[in-house]
Image: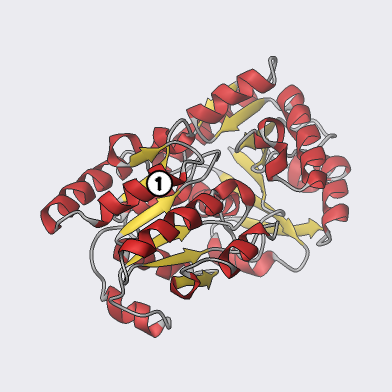
Amino acid sequence: MRVALDVSAVPERPAGAGRYVVELARRLPRGAEEVTLVARRGDAARWRVWSPASRVVAPVPAARPARLIYEAWVAGRSPAARDADVWHGPHYTMPHSGTTPRVVTIHDLTFFTNPEWHEPVKVRFFRRAILYAARHAAVLVSVSAYTARVLDEVVAEHAPVVVAPHGVFLGRFDPRDRDDDERLRRAGWPAPTPYVAFVGTLEPRKGLDVLLGAFAELAREDREIELWIAGQRGWGDAFEALVAGHPAAARIRRLGFVDDDLVPVLLRRARVVAYPSRAEGFGLPVLEALACGAVVVTTADTVMAEVGGDAVTLVPVGDTDALADALARALALDAHERAAVGLAARRRAELFTWDASLAQHRRAYAMAVAR
């Protein structure tokens, strides 16, 4: 099957949905698909490195407004679309013209359920994009059963949905110590300092306000523990103000964007990984932490509970005291208890593979062509 995969929205430093697109681009050509990656102008080189078996074309304007106009009104009639059996828009959006069957990935519905977590301009745009895709795509891919359920609530009538949970690269995200302390030192981070780790974009829905409140309680009882926060800044400045006025600000380490090869080290080496997000489409950092055998505390009644199952500790969304208590209990585990938790975490992660995810994507493509 000939698949045109739109990679034009992936930023220079992929995170979250961007990493999902990178994994699709890397892995799809290993099957029976002939894959064409549709990239931004000047952006073809990195995609040829990431996906050498794909054909890469780069006709899409680099500026966001022009890129979105191109996708809506030009891409569907482009040679890449005309030569494909199916077009895949992996980030909510799709061409509005052309006859090639279109598959669109829906990551989450928080633009509808919690618009206050996003910039207003993005809320307006993505609401329209999701509604259009739901009604005009041949098939929708949902990254979790949780997202599929919310989609049913938000959009009563929509295209058929295929649930394709993300996978994790088990060969890279694993529990084995690979000279981790030395690698942390080379990165400029102190080792073996004990720390709580957070990995994710710094934005309102991630629950960083709750994490900072919980860490204030931990820091009063434990004079050594630090909080290491890895991730790129999203939007909103409340986080900056909270850190600046935090009673243990000297023990909050801002790591910024962390290279892919260091993320497993950061997760493995953490005493506990905290991911108190209020809502996600999938919550990939939780799965990656589990694959590393980490002790993970995350939020109940979210997709993270679906991903983590019994291998994570769940606390109510927004509950600072419950998070502080769960983190304290995790920090108090002895070596035997930590080993048992780590083994359960790894076994849970092994249920999620990119091969399984790609099989579901191929099913979605076949359904789209058949329709």
Amino acid tagged 1:
Leu
Q: Quadrant of residue 257?
A: bottom right
Q: Residue at x 47, y 35 (%)?
A: 303
> Looking at the image, which residue sits at the far top?
157
Residue in the foreground of this view, choosing between 3 and 107: 107
Q: Residue at x 43, y 34 (%)?
A: 300
The quadrant of the rendering that contains the C terminus is top right
Q: Is residue 371 visible?
A: no
- Relative to 371, 288 lies left or right: left
In the rendered image, which residue does mark 1 sit on? 323
Q: Residue at x 62, y 19 (%)?
A: 152
Instruction: Examine the rendered structure and indicate whether residue 188 appears above or below residue 326.
Output: below
How many numbered circles are shown? 1
Mark 1: which secondary structure?
A: helix
- The image position of residue 82, as x and y in percent, is 77, 40
Residue in the foreground of this view, choosing between 53 and 225: 225
- Relative to 312, 164 lies left or right: right
Q: Is residue 202 visible?
A: yes
Q: Quadrant of residue 135?
A: top right
The quadrant of the rendering that contains the N terminus is top right
Residue in the foreground of this view, choosing between 104 and 270: 270
Residue in the foreground of this view, choosing between 78 and 19: 19
- Relative to 247, 233 lies left or right: right
